[in-house]
Amino acid sequence: MLLKKDSLPAAGSGPDAMVADPVFSKKYPTLWAYMSQTKWEDGTDRLPAGIMVFLQDGIFKARFTENETGKLLWIAAPSIFGVLEALEMALNVPQPDWRNDRRAGGGAFKKGKGK
C-alpha cells in the first residue's frame, strides 16, 4: 500500500505537546522516559531523546540520540521490537556504550540551535 499525500498527519502542536502511550511506556519505561520527559527532577527544561530506526541489509538498526548531551547509542537487531528491547536494556546498564555525535562536535546540542 502506498501512502497518499493527504493521508500524512498534519503538523502537531509543537515539540512540547504531551503525548501518552501507555502500552509503550509500560513495556519500555526507561526508553519512554528518555524520549518523553521535557523537565528534569528540579523542574529545569530538558531536551528529550530521539530514535531513528532504519532497515539495512535485512537488519533493523537504530540511532538513539540523547539530545541533552549529544551522545549516541547504536543498536542493531533482527526485528524492530528487538531494537526497542535492546535500547531499553542498554539504557539500564550502569555505563551505556555512549558515542560522541560527530554532527554536534561531540558535545551537547544547543537549545534553539537546530540539529
Image (spheres, rainbow, N blue to C red):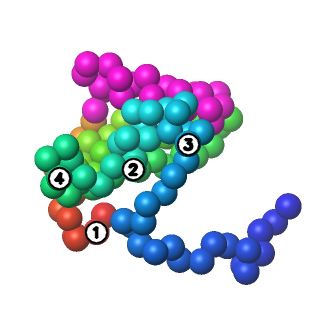
- Frontmost of labels 3 and 1 is 3
Q: Name the residue under label 4.
A: 43
Whichever of labels 2 and 4 marks the residue nearer the N terminus, that label is 2
Few, some or many C-alpha atoms within 10 Å of disc 2 (few <14, some 14-19, many ≥20)?
A: many
Which of 20 and 62 lies nearest the eye of the viewer? 20
Residue 106 appears in view: no
Picture coordinates of residue 109, whole percent (x, y): 21, 57
Q: Mark 4: give few (<14), some (14-19) or many (20+) Cα within 10 Å.
A: few
Which label was assigned to residue 36? 2
Membership of 48 in magenta stretch: no
Q: Which amino acid does label 2 sit on?
A: Ser
Q: Quadrant of the N terminus?
A: bottom right
Nearer-N-terminus badge (3/1): 3
Q: For marks 3 and 1, give the CA distance.
A: 29 Å
SS of the residue under disc 1: loop
Q: Where is residue 14 in the image (x, y as percent from the top left)?
A: 41, 72
What residue is at 81 percent from the left and 66 percent from the top?
Answer: 2
- Callout 4 amino acid: Gly
- The span picked out in magenta is 74-98
Label 2, label 4: how far apart the Cα atoms are: 14 Å
Q: Name the amino acid type tagged 1.
A: Gly
Q: Residue at x 37, y 41 (%)?
A: 33
Instruction: Give the labeled residue for mark 1.
Output: 114
Position of 86 with respect to 81 (left or right) is: left
Query: How far is mark 1 from mark 2, CA to CA?
Result: 18 Å
Q: Where is residue 102 in the image (x, y as percent from the top left)?
A: 26, 49
Give left or right: position of 57 versus 102: right
